[in-house]
Image: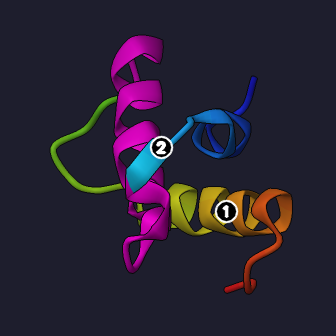
Amino acid sequence: MTAGQAAADINMGTFATWAGPEHIVMNVVRCHAEHSGTLKPVSDSDGTKTTMAEYNALKGGRSM
């Protein structure tokens, strides 16, 4: 499962109506990096953009 698929698969429950539910993407990208051994001190902005686009496509949101 990709980070985008994982983020889209998370049931946000009552928080799904909050503004910006796609913020979960940044947390999932970091978790994927940590568990794959690729975590770096600097944020993975390219990976986050790619994951955000995938998340939005799966959730029917806007693309970046």
x 38%, y 55%: residue = 15
Kindly state the secondary structure of the residue where label 2 is placed: helix
Q: Earlier in the sequence, mark 1 or mark 2?
A: 2
**Image: 1 above or below 47:** above
Classify residue 36 as left or right of residue 52: left
x 48%, y 53%: residue = 25
Residue 23 is covered by the magenta coloring: yes
Colouring method of the image:
rainbow
Give whichever of 19, 33 is nearer the camera: 19
Residue 32 is covered by the magenta coloring: yes
Q: Mark 2 points at which residue?
A: 13
x 75%, y 23%: residue = 1
Q: Identify the disc placed on residue 50.
A: 1
Range of the magenta residues?
15-38
Q: What residue type is labelled 2?
A: Gly
Q: Which amino acid does label 1 sit on?
A: Thr
Instruction: Specify the farthest residue to the left.
Output: 41
Residue 16, percent from left and from top: 49, 59
